[in-house]
Amino acid sequence: MTDPNDELPVGALAYDTETKALGVVMEAYRNYYALRPPRGGIEWDAPRDLTRPATLADQIAPVLAERNANSRLGL
């Protein structure tokens, strides 16, 4: 989690620990970040104290999950 005094810059990849979702910081306001999925989609508000910079593991987890699911389906 980030220190409330440390602000993630617009455009940074962030991880919302509450929803367990990766997002791009679109805006920082009050006690929230407006995050959007990296490939586009609907923005959501993430509390600053539950948001941190995304790690490499956060970034590759969705890709690995999709490949594993496809593998189980024989794709």
Image (cartoon, grey):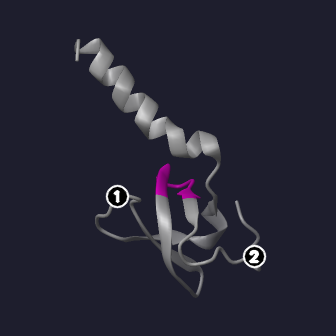
- Front in this rendered view, residue 72 or 45: 72
Query: In the structure shown, which secondary structural element does the residue marked by tag 1 occupy?
Result: loop
Real-space Cα separation, disc 1 to disc 2, in angstroms: 25 Å
Q: Position of residue 41 (x, y in %)?
A: 29, 64
Q: Position of residue 62 (x, y in %)?
A: 43, 39
On the image, numbered disc 2 is attached to which residue?
A: 6
Residue 1: quarter of image: bottom right
Q: Where is residue 32 in the image (x, y as percent from the top left)?
A: 55, 78
Amino acid under disc 1: Arg
Amino acid under disc 2: Asp
Q: In this view, does 28 lie above or below 74?
A: below
For residue 17, side relative to residue 38 (left or right): right
Q: Is residue 67 above or below residue 3?
A: above
Q: Which region is colored magenta?
A: 15-22
Residue 50: quarter of image: bottom right
> Residue at the location (61% across, 63% down)?
51
